[in-house]
Image (cartoon, rainbow, N blue to C red):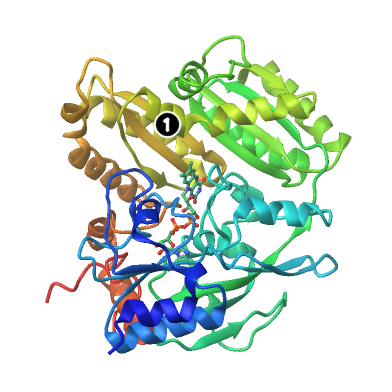
Amino acid sequence: MMTLSSKLAAIVGPAGCVSVEDSAPYLQDRRGRFEGKALCIVRPSSTQEVARVVTACVEAGVSIVPQGGNTGLVTGSVTDTTGEQVLLSLSRMNIVREVDPLNFTMTVEAGCILQDLQTAAENVDRLLPLSLAAQGSCQIGGNLSTNAGGVQVLRYGNARDLVLGLEVVLADGRIWNGLRALRKDNTGYDLKQCFLGAEGTLGIITAAVLKLFPRPVDPACAMVAVASPEAATKLLTRLQGATGGLVSTFEYMNGECVRGAVEAMDGNRNPLSDYYPHTALIEIGATGEASMRALETTLESAFEDGSITDAVVAQNETQRQALWRIRESIPEAQGRLGAGIKHDVSVAVSRVPELLARGSELLNELVPEGIVMAFGHMGDGNLHFNLNQPGSMPRDAFMSHAGRVNRAMHDLVMSMDGSFSAEHGIGTIKRDDLERYAEPVELGMMRALKQALDPMGTLNPQVMLPPKSD
Ligand SMILES: Cc1cc2nc3c(=O)[nH]c(=O)nc-3n(C[C@H](O)[C@H](O)[C@H](O)COP(=O)(O)OP(=O)(O)OC[C@H]3O[C@@H](n4cnc5c(N)ncnc54)[C@H](O)[C@@H]3O)c2cc1C
């Protein structure tokens, strides 16, 4: 009798099998916290092959972990340690099936690398606005399954807002072709929403129709030192008013983040004349001189009333990229500076100043020697509110605080009607938090969805939903 591994190998062919020697990158979690084992790793090249793999696994009673670029930050894309799960990588499904510039859409396979899709859109003078620091390796299927955010949510929304249609292999192996490229379609439940942000627990996304936008030429970009977080949120409001809502990026960085990005990374220099407690990277994605004028006029008046104390406006693309590099290199700089206790939290934009004040006080109280490094998508109310290891404390001693620090920060944001996981998802590492903070009614509806779409628990059984306690 054929084993499951040989059945799957026959389905995907030699090019779709990953040998044991090449398996390490697939089994290692991005942050190096976890290493899984797998019965086998397969890379199907078509939707039909994905469906056949799923069917074979269902028949054998074996569960599957779908994997995109494996850049997720909540350990959801790696098989567990039993060696009994199949890892299904979408990386060979990387064809752009259609670009329709008149409809402002593109139809793409799940394994396409995000950056390649941005380029494909640019080639027809369109913008695919989803943008994040992992874009050179994450895949669109992973982005949609985590409902990724990134640096342009303020203007264009999260990944789910960029989707018109989906193709999904269901947990029983059936293929759902929902690849509609329609702006209006009220024919029953919006089924695609079940799979967006579902982290591979309800179906395997194999293709999507994405929305495109007019491509801004010469976006206006600046880095400013704001007098306070309150002044930052007011500045955002003023900029939105001055541009008719065209601000695409409003990223916050505290002083330690800018200093870290400059001192720990080669090639970065501080564009401002000093390190300030509160800095923002701003971009207005309109075209040409109008956006630059709106930015400069608003910044001038903010200078006059003391809301900002220093600013640099990029005069060309090279300067713009240098400003962006500071923001983009913060996560790597943090890693180089020491271990980090990390949070991905959100509150209403109007409450971000309160979160910064209360969160910093809390972190200082819990680990007085720790270095507060807070940065992120202030325009979306989402901060990566991290605490970094001080030079004076060994790594293990510092990380021994992680549990209680995470708990206290999550308690704080939940008490402010916020979210303990704004854009990274639940994966395996935030399952307990979901159980702690989700309303029983919410958890019940989530379980009902899982039961309806994956009654055998074939897809990503260890991800997102905590096992039932009864
Ligand atoms: C440097 C860096 C910066 C980042 N910045 C951001 C950011 O700004 N915003 C943000 O939101 N995230 C960010 N992330 C997190 C991560 O990049 C995103 O979550 C990304 O969307 C994951 O895509 P992926 O292809 O790597 O998915 P993976 O990590 O491979 O998978 C993520 C989850 O989706 C499931 N999955 C993957 N593909 C499919 C599929 N086709 N069908 C069904 N399920 C699937 C997996 O099982 C897993 O549960 C960052 C990560 C890094 C390393």
Q: Which residue is mark 1?
A: 374
Check mark 1 vs ligand 1: CB closer than 8 Å? yes or no.
no
Is 5 drawn above or below residue 361 in the view shown? below
Residue at 59% x, 76% y is 166
Query: Quick one: 158 or 122, which is closer to the camera?
Result: 122
Horizontal arrangement in the rendering, residue 82 relative to residue 28 (left or right)? left
> In the rendered image, which quarter is residue 86 located in?
bottom left
Q: Is residue 364 visible?
A: yes
Residue at 30% x, 48% y is 415
Q: Quadrant of the N terminus?
A: bottom left
Horizontal arrangement in the rendering, residue 279 relative to residue 301 (left or right)? left
- Please, what secondary structure does the residue beneath circle 1 have? strand
Q: Is residue 191 visible?
A: no
Horizontal arrangement in the rendering, residue 1 relative to residue 10 (left or right)? left
Amino acid at dot 1: Ala
Query: Quick one: 62 or 144, which is closer to the camera?
Result: 62
> In the rendered image, which quarter is residue 39 located in?
bottom left
Picture coordinates of residue 314, whole percent (x, y): 74, 24
Is 194 drawn above or below residue 370 in the view shown? below
- Neighbor class of circle 1 (other Cα within 10 Å; few <14, some 14-19, many 20+) is many
Picture coordinates of residue 424, whole percent (x, y): 42, 52
Query: Quick one: 226 or 165, which is closer to the camera?
Result: 165
Picture coordinates of residue 394, whole percent (x, y): 19, 22
